[in-house]
Amino acid sequence: MADNPHLADDLRRVLIDEDAIAKRVDELAAEINEKYKDAEEPLILVGVLKGSFIFLADLSRRLTIPHIVDFIAISSYGQKGNQRGEVRLLMDTRENLSGHDVLIVEDILDSGSTLSYLIRTFKARTSKSVATAVFLDKPARHVVDIDIQFKGFEIPDVWVVGYGLDYKERHRTLPYIAEMIPEN
Ligand code: IMP
Ligand code: MG
């Protein structure tokens, strides 16, 4: 990175800088272009709100294959203390997913509850195929086994913000991924 950005007081360090993000998103888009190049129907990208919106915007603008952008909103419970994360659909897709290749676009894989719920839900809708693109992965936190086809970066078990990810709605639009200093 050319310059060290001025870090907010509640941030410890930059984990992934802007250049590294751009390079990795280029690579992921190239992999996705290649994988779906012969598809007969447009790929449907389903972004999980809110955290994925920046990753999805960057990724979709690098795709050269025909694709449709869509979103869902979910809420998850029991992320703290309770290991059994419970997930609820708050807003469904606009598109009918049936017969389409679906790519779920998620900001971060933590316990895996969110993605396992979404994969199950979309497969049940007879989507032609269901794959996942996840920008960040915290392997130390997995409770459910999830097969990720496109993964940005693995990170340690720390709370991160930026590039769509927030802490209580803070720091979501930082152009880099930074580690938070935990609140006490
Ligand atoms: P999972 O269902 O436990 O995999 O949770 C995934 C969701 O938790 C993500 O979509 C994020 O919304 C949130 N999350 C988990 N870790 C972080 C983090 O370090 N920063 C911001 N959000 C996070
Ligand atoms: Mg999320």
Image (spheres, rainbow, N blue to C red):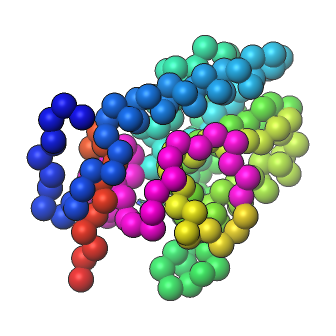
Is 180 drawn above or below residue 32 in the view shown? below
Q: Nearer the viewer, residue 49 or 157?
A: 157
Residue positioned most to the front: 2
Q: Is residue 172 visible?
A: no
Residue positioned most to the bottom: 81
Q: Residue at x 56, y 70 (%)?
A: 141
Tell how many labels: 0
Left or right of 50 on screen, residue 64: right
Q: Residue at x 70, y 42 (%)?
A: 149
Question: Residue 18 placed where, x, y %?
Answer: 32, 35
**Magenta highlight on residue 158:** yes
Which quarter of the figure is the N terminus placed in? top left
Q: Is residue 147 visible?
A: yes
Which quarter of the figure is the C terminus placed in? bottom left
Magenta region, main secondary structure: loop
Question: Residue 172 placed where, x, y %?
Answer: 32, 49
Q: Residue at x 81, y 19 (%)?
A: 39
Q: Residue at x 36, y 58 (%)?
A: 160
The segment highlighted magenta reads 146-171
Left or right of 137 on screen, residue 66: right
Is 108 drawn above or below residue 130 in the view shown? below
Left or right of 74 on screen, residue 163: left
Question: Residue 167 placed where, x, y %?
Answer: 32, 62
**Magenta highlight on residue 79:** no
Question: Residue 14 placed where, x, y %?
Answer: 27, 50
Is 61 drawn above or below residue 82 in the view shown? above
Q: Nearer the viewer, residue 130 or 15?
A: 15
